[in-house]
Image: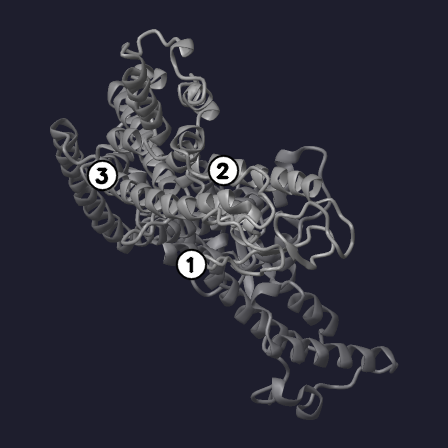
Amino acid sequence: MPPEQRQGAEFTDHRSDLWSLAATFYQMLTGEPPRVIDLDLLPPAIRPALAKSLKSKKEDRFQSAMEMREAILQAHSGKMDTSRSLGEGECPQCATLNPPDRKFCRNTECAAALEVDCLGCETGMPMWEGVCGNCGAKQESLLVEFKETLQAKHDEAEVFLSELKFDDALKAASVIGKQNDLRLQQLAAWHEEFSTRLESSRTSEHGRLEELIREAHVHEKAYDYEAGLQTLTQVAPSLKETTVSGNEDTADVLTERLTTKQSRLKELEGIVRERVGKREIAGLLVIVNELLTLKPDRPQVQNLKEQLEKREADLIESRDTAVKQARQQLNEQRYAEAVATLNTVSEEVSSEQLEELKNEASDLLNQVKNLRDRITMAVNGNQLKDLLTTVQECLTLKADQSDLLKLQEQLEKRFAALLGARDNVYQRATQQLRAQQYAEAIATINTVSEEVWNEDLEALKTHASDLLNQTNSSTARPPPSEEILGDFVVTPPLSSPAPLPEWYLARDGQTHGPYKDDQFIGFVNSGTITVDCQVQKAGTNMWTRAGDCPEISFMFYSTPPPPPLDDPRDDPWAQFQSSVDDDLDAFLKDLS
């Protein structure tokens, strides 16, 4: 048994067979089993050949059967040794002696060529001559040097073949194959044998490679990646990138793929084991599906998949229910509840529809919040102009806001009062123009709030200003006429103006008056008469709260405040502000 076979069958090759052949030859020659080899027992002629054949290292033995055969034949068979110098006229093929001037062997069964090219000048010369007659080059030294070069290629080719690097071996051997020098017949014979052996080895090794790759594929289809990788370890390193017929995968490509699958399989198993242990179920179904793709024959994992699929189906059902409920809540303007409902849905089953719905609810909720903030700031700052529009916009987005509904009602009443007051101002200013009280008319018109100011008031004010300017520029006041009053007098007075209304005031349990209209308005402007005072217009016989009397109520809501008094409690403007804000207190409290 060759030494390497004791280490394992995978370490043997054709050189191991040559060792066994030499051991058998040793026993035939000596009669002793080759357990202990004694080279002195061998015939001297054959001893070098067998000594090399029985070397412990494969690299030190003959690298081919042909090489071993040539050595044994030269030592013992009596065949011609073409490595020695030929005699003059000696044929290298049949050893027939020929005249020195012949170019071919005279043996009719041989007829071999007897001329070679000089190794120096490449001119033809008899092959047995040692010196070229043309250039004088000594052939023996050149032949030795040339043989050494070819021998190096010989050894290199054998090493490549032993490593199964067939293309490299063929390339190295081709240098020898190109030589046709009759003095190198030994190497020429080796090249022929080597080429045959190389092709035989290539066919054999490629067949074995194809079988190993096929076996690895079978293991891969069976999801046994470890077995597939173990099979591919038998592929020679030089063949790992070789493609065999019927399969596009090389051993390297297949090894990389199986290694990746095996590593990913172990990684996924660890993830599943850890997350199940920690009860971290979210997103686990995707991992389990990938795990079963790599190794489906796992009953426990299959059971886990079924449980996770049921859980996912329940989550999807809950999501769909939440979306339906949230849409209903949106339709009912319950935006905060819609957002809260959608937030209960697990992110695992989130959908584009759900996110769009959540964004819509959040946007509407923010719009309502922003509008309420604006309303709060306006009320706190007593900036009531155009506030009604903002309140209505907020109520359009969310109708069930009782505080805003109350505020809207108050603002509508306030706006209606402003409109009524404006109309009364228009009528009063017109009467003052008839009475040629132009400055008083302008002052009356200026009491109208900007919120209800219109073109008619502006035109009336301009007309009053023109009349006042005309009066100031003339020493005599012109009598009123249709030309002066223009369109602002519907019917010109047929006589002197009618007397202005008179007023009575109830205060401290007593009736005061009567007061002329302008005098009474002066009391209102000075704050002597407040919104809660009882007043009576002459001829009506009915006491009315001043703030509810159409003729003067507008003055309480549009008259600017007088300078502050020493005692705020005596300040009529503060009393007026208090009366206006009383109805807003509840709203401010609710907004806070």
The answer, for residue 513, to whether it is visible in the render is no
- Of the numbered discs 2 and 1, the one sitting upstream in the chain is 2
In the rendered image, residue 297, in percent from the top left (x then y), is placed at: 14, 33
Of the residues under marks 3 and 1, which one precedes in the sequence?
3
- Badge 3 local density, few (<14 within 10 Å), some, or many (20+)? some
Q: CA distance from mark 2 to mark 1?
A: 122 Å
The mark closer to the camera, 3 or 1, is: 3
**Residue 443 relative to residue 405: left or right:** right
Determine the residue positioned at 36% across, 41% down: 251
> What amino acid is labelled 2 in the image?
Asp
Against 165, is 414 above or below? below
> Which comes before the other along the chain, label 2 or label 3?
2
Colour style of the rendered protein structure: one colour
Q: Is residue 388 visible?
A: yes
Q: Which mark is residue 215?
A: 3
Front position in the image: 555 or 137: 137
Q: Nearer the viewer, residue 355 or 211?
A: 211
Residue under numbered circle 2:
81
Q: Position of residue 565 (x, y in %)?
A: 71, 38
Q: Position of residue 521 (x, y in %)?
A: 62, 59
Q: Give the quarter of the figure containing the N terminus.
A: top left
Q: Amino acid at mark 3?
A: Glu
